[in-house]
Image (tube, helix red, strand yellow):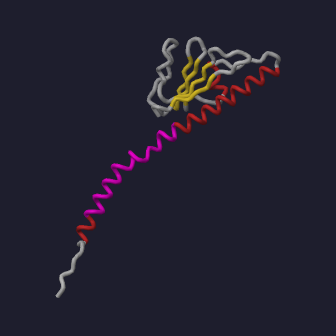
C-alpha cells in the first residue's frame, strides 16, 4: 500500500485558529476608521462654519454695514451645540476652536497660548479680519 501524505484535520484547525487570532489582533492597526471619521467630521464642521460665515456676512452687507461674524458666535451660528462639540473662544473673541466632543480634550482656550484644544480641531481665526478680509478657517487633524 501507498502511504498517503497530507494534513490532518487537527493540524488544519490549529492553523485556522492561529490565523484568526492574528487577524483579530492586527486588523485594528490596519483599519483605523475612528480617526478617519473624526477627520471627516472636522471637514463637515469647517464647511458649516464657512457657510455660516458667508450667510452672516451677506446679512450684514444687506443691512448696509458689511462685517464678518466674530469668533464667539460662529459655532452657534453654524448650528453646533455644546453637547456634540467642544467650543472654545479666546478672551479677545478672535479665535474659536471646535473639536468633536468624543475627543478627550477640554473646552478651555487660553488667550496667550491657544493649545488647550490641540491636534484635532477646526479653527476660526477672526484676528485681522475686517469688512474686506475674511477670517481664516483651518483644520488640524494630526491628533485625530
Q: Is residue 12 left or right of residue 138?
A: left
Quarter of image, res 130: top right
Which residue lies at the image location 49% right of the left edge and 30% below the top edge?
A: 120
Q: Is residue 86 above or below residue 132?
A: below
For the N terminus, the image quarter is bottom left
Extent of the magenta region: 14-38
Magenta span contains residue 116: no
Magenta span contains residue 26: yes
Q: Is residue 19 above or below residue 57?
A: below
- State whether the magenta stretch is mostly helix, strand or loop: helix
Q: Can residue 14 be seen from the camera position used here?
A: yes
Which residue lies at the image location 62% right of the left edge and 23% below the top edge?
A: 136
x, y (%) of residue 33? 47, 44
Q: Is residue 76 left or right of residue 20?
A: right
Which residue lies at the image location 27% right of the left edge and 66% below the top edge?
A: 13
Q: Can residue 82 be seen from the camera position used here?
A: no
x, y (%) of residue 84? 55, 32
Q: Is residue 4 left or right of residue 35?
A: left
x, y (%) of residue 58? 77, 25
Q: Nearer the viewer, residue 86 or 8?
A: 8
x, y (%) of residue 144? 47, 34
Q: Is residue 131 above or below residue 49?
A: above
Query: What count of labels does the image hold?
Result: 0
Quarter of image, res 78: top right
Q: Nearer the viewer, residue 13 or 7?
A: 7
Amino acid at each position: 500500500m501507498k502511504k498517503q501524505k497530507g494534513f490532518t484535520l487537527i493540524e488544519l484547525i490549529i492553523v485556522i485558529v492561529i490565523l484568526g487570532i492574528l487577524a483579530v489582533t492586527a486588523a485594528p492597526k490596519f483599519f483605523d476608521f475612528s480617526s478617519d471619521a473624526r477627520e471627516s467630521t472636522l471637514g463637515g464642521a469647517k464647511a458649516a462654519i464657512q457657510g455660516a460665515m458667508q450667510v452672516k456676512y451677506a446679512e450684514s452687507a444687506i443691512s448696509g454695514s458689511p462685517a464678518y461674524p466674530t469668533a464667539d458666535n460662529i459655532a452657534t451660528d453654524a448650528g453646533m451645540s455644546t453637547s456634540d462639540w467642544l467650543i472654545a473662544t479666546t478672551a479677545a473673541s478672535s479665535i474659536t476652536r471646535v473639536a468633536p466632543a468624543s475627543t478627550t480634550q477640554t473646552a478651555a482656550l487660553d488667550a496667550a497660548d491657544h493649545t488647550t484644544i490641540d491636534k484635532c480641531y477646526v479653527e476660526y481665526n477672526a484676528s485681522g479680519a475686517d469688512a474686506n478680509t475674511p477670517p481664516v478657517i483651518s483644520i488640524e487633524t494630526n491628533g485625530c
